Amino acid sequence: RKEVEQDPGPFNVPEGATVAFNCTYSNSASQSFFWYRQDCRKEPKLLMSVYSSGNEDGRFTAQLNRASQYISLLIRDSKLSDSATYLCVVNPPLGNRDDKIIFGKGTRLHILP
Amino acid sequence: GAGVSQSPSNKVTEKGKDVELRCDPISGHTALYWYRQSLGQGLEFLIYFQGNSAPDKSGLPSDRFSAERTGGSVSTLTIQRTQQEDSAVYLCASSLGKDPRGAFFGQGTRLTVV
């Protein structure tokens, strides 16, 4: 099982729809999780952290399921400007000698007018 | 500056030449990453530096690739005898180790080997 796996997409979604991405991770002791956004020909930027209790930022909701080892990102009322690649990111367990942050390959989202 | 700085932003080189790419991480960040991204593809991990520990070089694709980090700050990625398949965007990121805010990226160096 890969350390971090995402469906590469692309997801083609009409404007205004709700879209959800999942990301699975292999190390059950991983401590913190993030979603990054990468626009075309730009560098990835932090979109939001993912907290155990789930968290919401406007139209975006992130959730963590430790039992099944996945995180999710839900985008409601999608906008054209949401078109981007969404990267799942996992921080290693505390105290782990290998503390390298792991980036998924990303899921491409196209919002259609 | 406040962010991660990479130079040059664009580099065109002839096949067989050596190139050096530079990354200035955010001041105080102990962790530094190099990634490669080909057009339309995901991030490909290359190398990771953390403090004074031995770097994790597990992602370097061949012995033509090497990287250094001097004084725990600036890093240089060197590609020797460049090949056309080396053409990609090379991204550098830094973080405070297990910083809960994650890693911050530079704008990348777009390398084109002709």
Image (spheres, coloured by chain):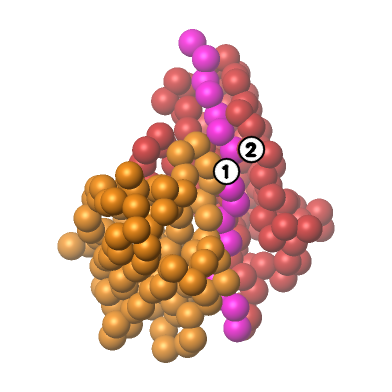
Chain colours: A red, B orange
In this view, A84 is above or below B11: above
Which residue is more in the foreground, B39 or A33?
Answer: B39
Q: Which residues are magenta?
A: A97-113
Image point (63%, 38%), residue name: A8
Residue drawn at x 69%, y 50% is A5
- Residue farthest along the front direction in this orientation: B16
Please tell me which of labels 1 and 2 falls first in the chain. 2
Q: Could you say which is closer to the camera, residue B80 or residue A28?
A: B80
How packed is label 1: few (under 14 Cα within 10 Å), some, or many (20 or more)? Answer: many
Label 1 to label 2, Cα distance in Å? 6 Å
B77 magenta-colored: no
Which amino acid type corresponds to the residue marked 2 in the rendered image? Pro
Which residue lies most toward the bottom here? B52
The residue to which callout 1 is attached is: A106
> Can you identify the residue that label 2 sits on?
A8
Where does the image place residue B103, in percent across and percent down from the top left? 43, 61
* Number of marks: 2
| Image height of A57 relative to A83, above or below | below
Q: Residue at x 44, y 68 (%)?
A: B64
Work out whether residue B105 can be spotted: no
Q: Position of residue B45 (x, y in %)?
A: 52, 61
Amino acid type at image mark 1? Gly
A102 left or right, relative to B100: right
- As drawn, the residue found furthest toward the top would be A113
